Image (cartoon, coloured by chain):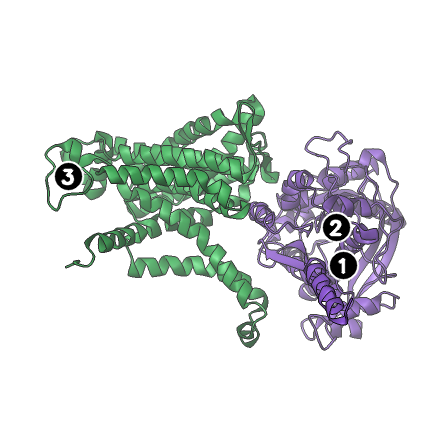
Chain colours: A purple, B green
Amino acid sequence: MTTRTTILSLAAAMALTLPAAAQPIPVGHLMDLSGATSDVGTPFAQGVNDTWAWINRTRNGVAGRQVNALAFDYGYQAPRAVSQYQAWSRDRVVAINGWGTADTEALVRFVTRDRVPYVSGSYSAALTDAGGRSGRQGVEPAPYNFFYGPSYSDSLRAMLIWAAEDWKGRGGQGKPKYVHMGGNHPYPNSPKAAGEALAAELGFDVLPAIVFALTPGDYTAQCLTLKQQGANYAYLGNTAGSNISVLRACQAAGVNVQFLGNVWGMDENAMKAAGTAANGVVFPVRTAAVWGQPAPGMTNAQAISRISDQGGTAYRPVHYLAGICSAMLLAEAMDTAAANGGQVTGERIRDSFYARQNWVPNGFDGVCAPSNFTPADHRGQLTVALYRARVTGDTSQGSVGDLIQSGVMRLESVKTVTLDRRADWLGW
Amino acid sequence: MDLAPAGEYRSSYREDMTIFPTRNSRRAVLLGLILACGLPFLLGRYELGLLINIGTLGIAALGLNILVGFTGQISIGHAAFFGFGAFASAWLHERWHIPVALCIPIAGAMTAVVGLVFGAPAGRLKGLYLAIATLAAQFILEDFFARAQWFTGGVAGRITEPFALGSWVADREESYFYVVLAYVVVMYLGAANLIRTRDGRALVAVRDHYLSAEVMGINLAYYRTLSFGIASFYAGIGGALYAHYLLFVSVEAFNILFSIQFLGMVIIGGLGSVMGSLMGAAFMVLLPEVVQAGADLLSGSAIDRALKLGASISFLREMAVGAAIILFLIFEPDGLARRWRLIKSYWKLYPYSH
């Protein structure tokens, strides 16, 4: 064979194989940048987007193929998410990073039918019953749904366990009173029954739930009800924006309640906005560290942050880190699916979620908390780290980063609760 | 007669009222239908999805056009009726196990009844007052959807089943397209014929001048309320078709903005035009897609960086719809239907259009 033919045949081989190898992998990303939960949806979506860009840039994508992350702002409207999902079938997305509870639950049947792994920002317990064995009403098998973090119900259970101890520790007399607060929407409703049941079990007096909308507004009336009822522990089921309104209104009304925040109900931005009204709120943090804390994986997280902040000075709230960990879980599952020459198909990605024990994405030790998934049980995390928001001064001046730096605001670890993997809590 | 004669040669009302005046126009319609039937073999799922949306919204928009364009009433609660049809169909199937194929017309009838109830004020109110009364319908129904767990599944929404006829299941765009196409043909022919009947002429008379209509012996309250019933029937059918296409219904979709969008479709398509309703629906469905495509092109480009649009690009989509309505009101108040007629007559008369 002459050199010329060798080169020609090599070139031909390259031409044949290159397009196949370079074909990007389409991954969907539903985000809320303009809807009712955009306050926390924006940092989370930024974390996910930056992570995919970082994977493409530094790791050359997944298994040598670039990832084409198709981000779509659905404005927290479930029907729009469903129609976007159908539009994505044209792009043959292999997996989706999702967001809200209503849309994720609406899409369960579709992703199960089409075998598209779906890593949601919703931690609704209804998504954890992968095999559909819990037999609970309204809970369908969700074999393709995953999420990074403890479920809403499990987080609330952990907070209630802490609250019961806290009540004893404070020497409280009689039964403590617990109340669930949130909008009438699938997301705040998700842990309601589970929380009220455990609260009753732990000896709380469970008060009738208080409703307030997902959007910021004047919630003085709700705070007065809270005061009148004499509640001791109140769960805030909404996202940060409307919770801030409640915290401020309750501070003004002089309500003395220990607030328990949902995982999306509190973050550094909300602390700054609420000021001292946020002082003392206890809430779960899904990551093993918060921004800037020393951890082996923090350098990678900071590298991801520089994708959208070249200066590298931005302070990232807890939701940004959770976005990184969510996207990294999916990315590694895709990597595993592609290992040994496999195709990156939905089914193989799903099975890859079961491949590891105490799974922390490579390079994110100390940042992402370990997850365990099994084919029947998608409760990835049962260990809930509870933090308390500490705001000691005026937060109106300076950025979130400055306020954390100066110690005006800080997140203080309270307790880490590890729940039993109870069979009767699956899907609830 | 293959060509329309250049003059008025019609000698009977029958000839005057016919929908398709020449043999060629009838042929064109048949050919169009046959071509439409072939579309699932040519288009992808995404394009078919858009066509299905145009069909379902087009049916509901036609209902609103009968109310607004033909009867001269106003409604800013059309989305609530659309939603009622969607929930009713889902509920009928889930609770009573009625086949989906039957659920859709029953849901339409149920919505018509609800529409008659909420349309009752139309017997006495006009203009702005009627608009506020229909606004109440919007909010009452929306609140009902959020609370009536037994009917709608509450705020969590309800999963619906795909359309099935015997063993044929329309759970894909390729198959569901035919269901929607059939409904579009039936509902549009129905509306075109309705306008030719005594009742249809009565509706138009009410619009043109209510006092003259009353003097001619038309029962105003009856026809105004009837118009609400018909509009709701169309909305209910459209909603039911939507429910069995998305396979999920939730209260969030049927808000006041959606009602305004229906008004937008009717205005953009052309008030008082049957075909215009479909054109308006097509415009409203395709516009956000076009804007989205434009935004995708724009994002990351030099313009994006220069104006620091960033995340705000997603708001372009919402703004474009508003801008389109304003531009149409200014430059084409008679809607796409008139523009279409102008284009047709331009070619018909070419090159002697004067």
Report the side of B295 relative to A302 (left or right): left
Q: Please tell me the numbered disc located at residue B212.
A: 3
Marks 2/1 in contact by CB < 8 Å: the verdict is: yes
Q: Residue at x 60, y 56 (%)?
A: A72
Dot 2: chain letter: A
Residue B137 pos. (x, y %)? 42, 39
Under tag 2, what secondary structure? loop
Question: Are labels 2 and 1 on one chain?
Answer: yes
Marks 3 and 1, how far apart in space? 74 Å
Front: mark 3 or 1: 1
Residue occupying image coordinates x 36% and y 43%: B75
Q: Name the residue under label 2.
A: A344
**Label drawn at residue B148:** none
Q: Mark 2 or 1 closer to N-term?
A: 1
Residue A173 makes an appearance in the image: yes
Q: Mark 3 lies on which chain?
A: B
Amino acid type at circle 2 is Val
- Give the quadrant of the N terminus of chain A: bottom right
Q: Which mark is residue A62?
A: 1
- Do the residues at discs 3 and 2 belong to one chain? no
Residue depicted at 75% across the width and 33% down the height: A132
Q: How far apart are marks 2 and 1 (CA)?
A: 9 Å
Q: Please state, as top left, top right, bottom left or bottom right, where the C terminus of chain A lies in the image.
A: top right
Q: Rounded to the nearest whole Å, what is the CA distance between mark 3 and mark 2?
A: 71 Å
Q: Relative to residue A3, is residue A170 depicted above or below?
A: above
In the picture shown, does residue A183 fall above or below A251? above
Question: Mark 1 packing: few (<14 Cα in 10 Å), some, or many (20+)?
Answer: many
* Residue B143 image position (x, y, % from top left): 51, 40
Closer-to-camera residue (B64/A327): A327
Identity, as a three-letter code, of the amino acid under mark 3: Ser
